[in-house]
Amino acid sequence: MIVSMPKGAELLQGTLDLLILRTLELEPLHGVGIADRIEQVTHGVFVVGPGSLFPALHRLSERGWIEGQWGELETGRRAKFYVLTPSGRKQLAKEKRNWQKVATAMNQVLAEQT
Amino acid sequence: MAWISRVKALVRRILAREQVEDELNEEVDAYLDILTERHMARGLSREQARRAARIEFEGTEQVKERVREIRVGAAIETTLRDFAYAWRVLRRNPAFTIVAILTLALGIGSATTMFSVVHGVLLRPLPYPDADRVAEVTMNFSPQNTPRGPLSMADFLDWRAHSRAFERAEAYARNLIILQFDDEGKSEMVPSANVSGGFFRALRATPALGRLIEEQDEKPGAAVVVLSDRLWTRRFGRDPGVIGRVLRLNREFTIIGVAQPGFAYPPDAELWGNLEVQPPSRRGPFNFYGIGRLRPGATLDQARAEMRVLAERIERDHPRDYSRLSYPLVSLREAITGEVKPALLAMFAGVAALLLIAVVNVAAILLARAGARERELALRASLGAGRGRLIRQLLTESLLLGLGGAALGALLASAGVHAVVWLKLDRLPRMSDIRLDGPVLAFAISVALVSAVLFGLYPALHGTRSALNSALHEGARGATESRRRARGVLVAMQVALCTTLLAGAGLLLRSFLKLQDCHFQNYLA
């Protein structure tokens, strides 16, 4: 998984999936919208380029966690909007729990060492 | 239910391939458009904005390719593409393809023919229920010293009287009968047997018509015969009215029944007459083989122990007739196929060596061709195909050759099996069980797959290595050098295999002659 990270942050395997699912939890978005939102919310720590975004979106669609629907932009341009499916919502909840477990554990380790 | 959505995606991709591709294109275009508009909003011209968007996108084709790769069934698509490519390569080189397939077909065909014989004779279950509970009783004593010789009537009756481990103790004597048919004046020799009353019951045989030989037929003066299905078909046109008719042999016999198709014990017997069981006045002649079915719960080892005790007693009672007496028990399968087993296995090893020679030959041709294909492989390598990808491609070609060889080989084997049956290879038991069927074809295909890997792997590894080398610097000498060495190894293997095969063939011939000899003596006895 290649994600461009200007500030040197390494993205863990599966983190991009979690970011996308979380982003779509709020509202359906098209590809550029998803990339923008992730950059915005993480204050530019994660910049997701199309090279990683497209494969990730299609992989999540294959698993049935998100669904692509064609919609129209304000300019009248057709674009594919991605929507979180019910099974995607379940998956998100699961991954959130996992992440929190990992994050808590990591924080503890780091706190001990400093 | 992630897999349901995956299957749906796969089906959609197969059924609506173009639509899926169009959608991917449009999705990518839309993404580009949005980026372009954003750049234009910052004051760039349409042209400049477009270029900036493209740079930001990191290569549209690469992104699309990565999306295609993560799709379910991408592996299937690649495989199909490999096969299509392999097919084109092989078709473009008909001389090579034909030689390779013919070579393989000869190897696979002969191996399959031999396997169908081995499978039919040695591996296929015997057509008798619970055949592993049936044993043949033979005897060995000084001065005759035949390891599995026949019994005398006296020995048979002693065994029958004292056996505990067997629920039935029966006997048969093999004969060759000359059948004469009045209406046509033709005669033929028919393998037959005289059997005691419980013989058919010990083998759990049932009649197809009429009745089989039973206990009452052991009485002196009875003269009845049972026909095999084959004899009934050949000589009586499957006429049900045959029951009760009289068959004139050395005296008149009444036909009482027809056995089930496939029942042929002793091997190849086509006619069974009753055996008159009378206590004899002396221990001889030695004409009879015992046949017994183990009592439920009794083991063959118990039966063997019992036979040892019996042998001791009889030897004690008849010191002038026997010394070093034993009654070896032989399983039914061993009794039927034991004699031909070593020869069949030796022949099977022979055709396996033949197949290996074919495989080595094809490997040598492939290796020779690797030189000619170096440029093609180098080109594909420079276009981004990894070594694994190239090896996979070359192995697909080998696989296709192997399958072609298997298809043609199966045809050859079907002719071979007919030839074996038609030749009536002398005294080969269970001829009617030899045929080309599912397991035999499965064998042919597995052999083809294994061969394909055997002859394809080395040339593929070798060819891709030198292709990648010469992609870097044209005409690397190391490649030619190692190819020459590899060819030397293949030639050496071939010489070794041929020598083994020739030596094996010589030994085989000798053991066959011995076998024939021994049969001849059995008939004279």
Image (tube, rainbow, N blue to C red):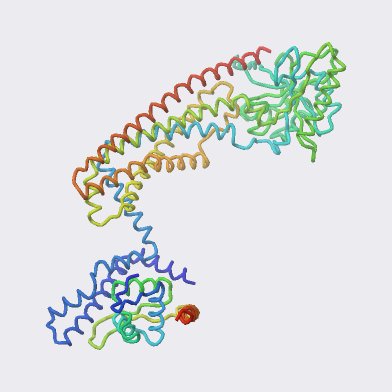
The image shows a total of numbered marks equal to 0
Residue B434 in sight here: yes
Q: Residue B397 occupies which quadrant of the picture?
A: top left
Q: In this image, B153 relative to B401: left or right?
A: right
Q: Which residue lies furthest to the front in this view?
A: A114
B6 and B376: which is toward the camera: B376
Say which of A76 and B387 sits in front. B387
- Say left or right for B180 vs B483: right
Q: Position of residue B274 (x, y in %)?
A: 76, 23
Picture quadrant where residue B448 is located: top left
Q: Which of A82 and A40 is in front in this view?
A: A40
- Residue B208's x, y, as percent? 69, 35
Q: Quadrant of the C terminus of chain B?
A: top right
Q: A103 left or right of B321?
A: left
**Residue B416 x/y as whole percent:** 46, 30
Picture quadrant where residue B180 is located:
top right
Residue at image x 68%, y 27%? B242
Front residue of B221 and B495? B495
Q: Residue furthest right?
A: B317
| Residue depicted at 70% across the width and 38% down the height | B129
Is residue A96 visible from the viewing direction of this image? Answer: no
Residue at x 43% of width, y 72% of height: A63
Q: Provide residue B86's location: percent of width, then percent of height.
A: 31, 47
